[in-house]
Image: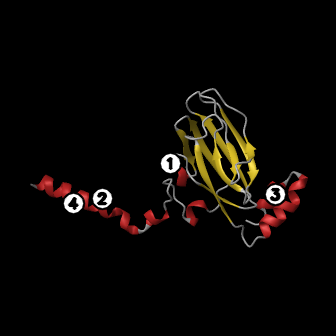
Amino acid sequence: MKLTGAAAATALVAGCSSDDGDSDDDDDSGNDNSAEAWEGVSEFSLLGKTGGWEGVEPEAIAGVQNPTLYLTAGEEYEVSWENDDGSTHNFTIESGEGEDLEQTDDVDEQGESTSMSFDASEEMAEYYCVPHPDAMRGEIDIQEGNGGENGEENGNESDSGNGNESGNESE
């Protein structure tokens, strides 16, 4: 009888544990979309496998399949990923109109990794793997820049090839 009571209490606690409001910050892909979870994030790490991209870092996407990436327009980001299954993969950022905007080289050896840096822009809509476009596809959610000034300054200075400094000076 005590075991049943303990099991019932555990079930009750487990059932109520999501009432703290944190679940409201999870998006449809299962990652944390709260402002706090994405503050200061400029690097993403993923595992590439035929069944879908798996989030590694930041913590907000850890273990999430095809996580939504929350980016701020005009900010510089780096995405790195490791081939987890030995199939050929690449990482491509696509516009809402289906135009490929950024892309890594193909990686076809398990354990091999690559990365790319890019400036987030409002035209970015999704990321995907060209050889596996249906299973390995996630959304990109672009947020407005802080007051719009960072995006404008970064865009004007990017011709020098050192947009990295201008994007990081304000914070």
First along the sequence among labels 3 and 2: 2
Say which of 109 and 167 sits in front.
109
Mark 2 or 1, closer to the camera: 1
Q: In this rendering, would 40 be left or right of 119?
A: left
Distance, label 3 to label 2, CA atoms, is 46 Å
Say which of 169 and 161 sits in front.
161
Distance, label 2 to label 1, CA atoms, is 21 Å
Distance, label 1 to label 4, CA atoms, is 29 Å
Residue drawn at 67 percent across, 31 percent down? 107
First along the sequence among labels 1 and 3: 1
Circle 1 crowding by C-alpha within 10 Å: few under 14, some 14–19, many from 20: some
Q: Amino acid at mark 2?
A: Ala
Q: Amino acid at mark 1?
A: Val
Distance, label 4 to label 3, CA atoms, is 54 Å
First along the sequence among labels 2 and 1: 2
Residue under pointer 2: 14
Residue under pointer 1: 64
Residue under pointer 4: 9
Distance, label 4 to label 2, CA atoms, is 8 Å
In the rendered image of this protein, does residue 156 appear above or below residue 67? below
Mark 3 or 2, closer to the camera: 2
Mark 1 or 4, closer to the camera: 1
Mark 1 or 3, closer to the camera: 1
Q: Position of residue 36 (x, y in %)?
A: 57, 65
